[in-house]
Image (cartoon, helix red, strand yellow):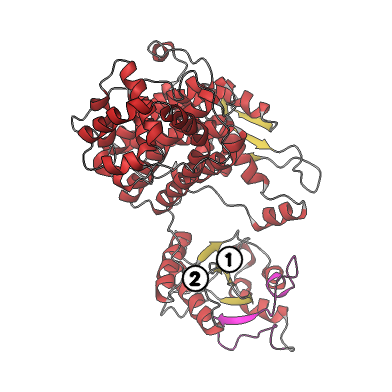
Amino acid sequence: MIPRIHKRGSATVGLIRYLYGPGTHEEHIDPHLVAAFDPLMPDPGRDPQATYGQLQRLLDQPVSALPAGRRPDKHVWHLSVRASPEDPVLPDDAWAAIARRMVAATGIDPEGDDAACRWAAVRHADDHIHIIATLVRDDGRRPRLHNEARRAQAEARLIEADYSLRRVTPGDGTAAKRPTSAERHKAERRGRQRTPREELREAVRRSVAGVGSEEEFFDRLAGAGLLVRRRVAPSGDPLGYTVALPGDRNATGKPVFYSGSKLAPDLSLPRIRERWNGNPDHPAQQLALPPVTGPASARRRVTGAAWQALLVVDHGENGVVAAQIAATGEVLDALAQTSAAHTRHELQAAAAAFERASRSHVRASHGHAHALRRAARDLVQSGPAFGRGEDGAATAMAIDMLIFLVSAAAHWHAGKQHAQQAEAAHRAAEHLRTAYRTAAERPIAALHQRGVRMAPSQQHRGALVRQALPELADRIITEPGWHALVATLDEVQAAGHSATTLLTEAAARRELGTAAHMSDVLVWRLRRSAGLPAGPRNLQVPPAHGKRPVAAPEPVPRSEVMPLNGSPRRR
């Protein structure tokens, strides 16, 4: 059940004509009253003698009774209440009861108030009603409508429970503004799947990912093909900005501009500046960072930064955690921008879903998210990956760790009762799992090929696994990915590491028993812990066709995220 309060208007009869009319696409069917402040209210939809003018005069009577100087300009209140697509079709008497509950909850017509505002509820489709009211009470006073949108949402949650309807995840006022019906209809007329508002929000969000300064931000906006206007104070200091799509124009032929804050709460210029408190370009922050030499190197940096952020999300202070989650959104945006074609769609979907998870009422301490923002910047600057060889393997390794980080963000939001954010993070994780299966197919197949050729080593590696993971060894050894794990264990020992120690530590980071293919999970953990290249050395990657599906890693159990000694494992 989704209530939506629309902009206030000044013409009661204009809204009545729309509610009883055919609609912009002939979608209004059998418009009629289901409830009103007066049960004897004339209904132009069912009574041929009733007129729009009669309905308008009855609703506007308290407004007309005021002296001209006291009449409010915007006195028309409009609320639509829509059922979810999977909900059953409710009868008129149910919608009438819902309308009465909504006007009572919002303050239009509180229960027991004989001098409340006048209103009427019109139904012109199976799945929703519209409530029109005039914002002058019968006693001449104005109604108290403080937080009426939030109260309407709260009442909707109660209605869902009472009528056994789909339970909509409650919001907290931090979501991006949805497109208006006029924007949606305009997009439909032009054959566009998304509105300009939605396209601009995505373009600005991508431009912010890992950006290091205000000038770089505006350069990226221009480079994305957007029309950009800066709002400047008399002193010359920039105060804000607006953006427009070149082809989106109003009736007079002028571009339709949107401010950053109208696209999303965290895309205003002051909020974007907060991210630069820990500028990733600052020399002091680059001293300990080796240079990124290409897409694979950038993705390995993402893996390391995501692991450090994962520890913070599970054990850090709220503001620091919120910063890590916001920066995770930047990494996902940057990864989606630079991903290979075969993973791009799912990574873009993951970034779009996680956008909602990146904001909450917990104010982010952005200065604590250097590593992730630096990783996002490296991704953008290193350019696109082609999805083959080391690039493809490093992408799979990065996605593997991002799944854990996004799942940890979902758990943190759920613990804070951030329902919409937690749901969004879970959706993002599902898209990442799909992208992982695609990205990991070639490198896992290459490791498998190498492991098959190492028959003499398999018995020795099997004994090693039985020593380190006695309860899981039989299952791991019989998995299709066993040969890839054998090849990785061989590289671990060749690099001078203790395979037994790293295998034990890799297994301790998660509950392996829930994974579809434990061997795949261990391969990535071992290669990361031992500092090995993401893909096998000196081996041509075979075609992906006909290979077994690669399992995506499962969410991280909360008890397994931090090692027992409280510090990150050796990489």
The residue under label 1 is which amino acid type? Trp
Q: Is residue 7 left or right of residue 156?
A: right
**Which residue is found at the position 72% from the left and 49% from the top?**
192
Inspect the image, locate mark 2, and give the three-letter code of the amino acid beneath it: Ile
As drawn, 214 above or below 114: above
Query: Is residue 33 in the magenta section?
Result: yes
Q: Nearer the viewer, residue 428 or 171?
A: 428
Residue under pointer 2: 108
Q: Position of residue 131 (x, y in %)?
A: 58, 72
Q: Which residue is mark 1?
A: 77
Which residue: 66% across, 79% down?
55
Marker disc for residue 201 = none
From the viewer's perspective, is residue 370 above or below residue 424? above
Rate crowding at label 1 as few (under 14), some (14 to 19) or many (20 or more) other CA atoms within 10 Å. Answer: many
Which residue occupies 63% across, 35% down?
242
Q: Is residue 193 magenta?
A: no
Specify whether residue 369 is in view: no
Dot 1 and dot 2 residues touching (CB under 8 Å): yes
Vertical position of residue 2 compared to residue 485: above or below: below
Magenta-tinted stretch: 18-47
**Residue count near mark 2 (Cα–Cα under 10 Å), binned few <14, some 14–19, many ≥20:** many
- Specify the farthest residue to the right: 252
